[in-house]
Image: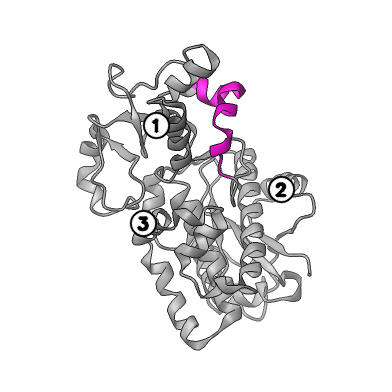
Amino acid sequence: MPLQRVVLFEDDDKRAKQLLSLLRRSLRGQVEIKRFEPATATGKGRGELFETRLEKDVGRPAYRNTILFITDRDLSKTPGYTGLSEAAVVRVADAADLPVVLYAQGASFNVLDHRRGWGDGSIVLKGKSTEDHAAELTVLVKGFLRIRAEYRGMLRGPHHTRSPAALMAELMGRPRYLDRVAQYGLGDQKYFAEIVPLAKEDKRSRLEMRLVRILGTWLYDSILRFPGLLVSGKAAASYLDIDPAEFEGSKQIERLFVSARYRGPFSEGARPIWWRPDLDDLLLKARCESGRALVKKKLRRDPGGCKCSVDASKRAGFFCMVTEKPVSDEESEAAVSWFPPGADLARINKKVFEELRPWLASY
C-alpha cells in the first residue's frame, strides 16, 4: 500500500518547522507529514475562489493518498492566498471526505468553542502550545490510521452492511455496548444523513472514505469528549470518588482498574480512558460502592474522595464540561440540549450555566 499522507496548512515557517519535526519524530514514518505548498501563488488561477484553487493544489500527485488535513485557523500569510482562513480548507476537506483538525497558536478551546462549530465535521485541538498540538495530533493520526485499517478489514466480512453505531461498537472493541454507542449518535444525524445518498448509488470507495471520517470524528469529538460510556482523567476520578491527584498520579491505583481500560482508536494518549460499565463490574465483583472503597480494600490506604468544585462538602460524581472540573449533582445542570444523550455524566456548573443562559440558545 502506498504511504499515506497528512497535509499541514500553516503559514508561519518557524511554527510549521517545529510542528513537522515533532510529528515526524512521534509518528516514525507511519505516515508522510507534508506541509501545503501553493502551486498557484502567482499568475493563472489568481482570480478563482480559494476553494477552487485549493482543490487543484491538493489534487497534485504530491498530495495523493492524503487521509487528514491539519490547519491553523489563521492562514492569511499563505503565499498567493491573502486572507485565507480555515473555512476554505474545511470546505475542501469536506468535498474530499477527509477529516480536518483545527488549531490556533496560544489559544485553547473548551466545549463552548467546540459547540460554535458543531456539525462542520472538524476537530478542534484543546492545547495552546505547539508541543500540546503535536501530542494531540499524534493520537489523532494514529487513531484515524487504525480506523481506516480496521474498517477495510470489515469490508471483507459481513460488517459492511451494519449501521454506523454497530461499526463503531466493533471498532471500539465492545460490540456488546452497541445500544450505549447508538445513544451518542442521536445528536449527530447530520453525519449519518451523508451516508444515505452514497449507499443508494453504491459508491463504495467514497462511502468508505466518508465513513472513516464520520466514525473517527464522532468517536473523538463526541463519545470520547463527553463522559458517559467512557470516562478519563478528572471525569473518571469524579465518578469513582477518588481524589483526582491520586487517581491520575498513582500507578498502583491505575493497575486496580486496568481490566476496564479502553484500548480502541485514539487510546494512545498520555492518560488512560476507561469503560464505565467495566468499572461498574469491577466494583460489583469487589462488593465496593465506589472506587475509593476499592482502593481502601485492595491497597489498605485512603486515596481521598473527589469533592465538588463548587461545594467541597459534597461528593462530586459528575463533570463540568465548561470548567473541566468535578461537580456534584446538586451543583450542576444536566438539561443541556446539545450534550449527547449517552453522556449522562456531562454537566455544567449551575453558576456558570446561569451566567451563560442568555447565550446558550445560540450555541
Q: Amino acid at mark 2?
A: Leu
Q: Decide if residue 321 is in sight here.
A: yes
As for residue 102 lying within the magenta part, the answer is: no
Q: Residue at x 26, y 52 (%)?
A: 337
x then y, percent, for residue 74: 53, 54
Q: Earlier in the sequence, mark 1 or mark 2?
A: 2
Q: Amino acid at mark 1?
A: Tyr
Left or right: residue 345 compared with residue 174: left
Left or right: residue 164 compared with residue 316: right
Q: Earlier in the sequence, mark 3 or mark 1?
A: 3
As for residue 258 lying within the magenta part, the answer is: yes
Mark 1 Cα-neighbour bin, 10 Å: few <14, some 14–19, many ≥20: many
Nearer to me, 304 or 125: 304
Q: Earlier in the sequence, mark 3 or mark 2?
A: 2
User: Principal SS element in the magenta part?
Assistant: helix
x then y, percent, for residue 100: 55, 60
Element type where label 2 sits in the image: helix
Nearer to me, 349 or 50: 349
Q: CA distance from mark 1 to mark 2?
A: 34 Å
Mark 2 Cα-neighbour bin, 10 Å: few <14, some 14–19, many ≥20: many
Residue under pointer 2? 23
> For the magenta stretch, what is the residue range?
245-262
Element type where label 1 sits in the image: helix
Q: Residue at x 43, y 36 (%)?
A: 280
Mark 3 Cα-neighbour bin, 10 Å: few <14, some 14–19, many ≥20: some
Camera-near label (1 vs 2) is 1
Q: Residue furthest bottom?
A: 201
Residue under pointer 1? 239
Residue under pointer 3? 183
Q: CA distance from mark 3 to mark 2?
A: 34 Å
Q: Are marks 3 and 1 in contact (CB under 8 Å)?
A: no
